[in-house]
């Protein structure tokens, strides 16, 4: 039997395992009963929420360190949405606005945005600056899926 997919509840942040054969049943969060986002859209998070997310996620977490005024960051955004949809349940994509949430970016010594980081098993696996789109973005996360 295939591993269940994992979806983060947009309402309460809870992690929910969902078997593929149950996806058509409009699964809800086990904690708060909200309907789960099965397309797993990227989620904006604070430093504290990111800490909890990477510690508790049973699937890899791709983090986009960005800012609203950054042109390349805005260009990457639709590619993150597409990747989230393609890897729904197998990858969680989080976005950290470095203008509002500076702690994690400081710890990682983020000096340019966008910077992408991948966490797996609660540990940082890779962090690199640069706008990645399409195949480059897929290739960046592929070793951790």
Image (cartoon, helix red, strand yellow):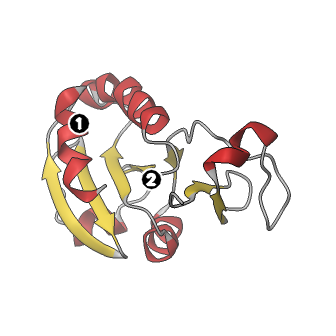
Residue occupying image coordinates x 25% and y 48%: 141
Q: CA distance from mark 1 to mark 2?
A: 25 Å
Q: Quadrant of residue 51?
A: bottom left
Residue occupying image coordinates x 24% and y 41%: 114
Image disc number at residue 100 = 2
Q: Judge from the rendering whether residue 85 lies leftward or rightward of residue 104; answer left or right.
A: right
Q: Judge from the rendering whether residue 65 lies leftward or rightward of residue 126; answer left or right.
A: right
> Residue 133's x, y, as percent?
23, 27
Residue occupying image coordinates x 63% and y 40%: 38
Against 79, is 57 above or below?
A: below
Against 14, is 22 above or below?
A: above
Against 6, is 130 above or below?
A: above
Q: Is residue 111 visible?
A: no
89 or 103: which is nearer to us?
Answer: 89
> Residue 122's x, y, as percent?
37, 76
Could you tell which of marks 1 and 2 lies nearer the N-terminus?
A: 2
- Circle 1 residue: 137
> Residue 70's x, y, as percent?
29, 31
């Amino acid at each position: 039997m295939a591993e269940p997919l994992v979806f983060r509840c947009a309402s309460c942040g809870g992690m929910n395992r969902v078997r593929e054969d149950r996806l058509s049943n409009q699964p809800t969060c086990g904690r708060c009963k909200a309907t789960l986002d099965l397309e797993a859209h990227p989620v904006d998070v604070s430093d504290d929420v990111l800490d909890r997310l990477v510690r508790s996620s049973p699937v890899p977490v791709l983090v986009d360190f960005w800012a609203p005024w950054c042109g390349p960051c805005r260009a990457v955004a639709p590619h993150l949405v597409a990747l989230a949809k393609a890897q729904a349940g197998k990858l969680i994509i989080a976005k950290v606005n470095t203008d509002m949430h500076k702690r994690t970016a400081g710890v990682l010594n983020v000096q340019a945005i966008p910077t992408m980081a991948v966490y797996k098993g609660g540990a940082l696996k890779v962090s690199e600056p640069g706008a990645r789109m399409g195949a480059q973005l897929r290739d960046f996360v592929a070793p951790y899926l």
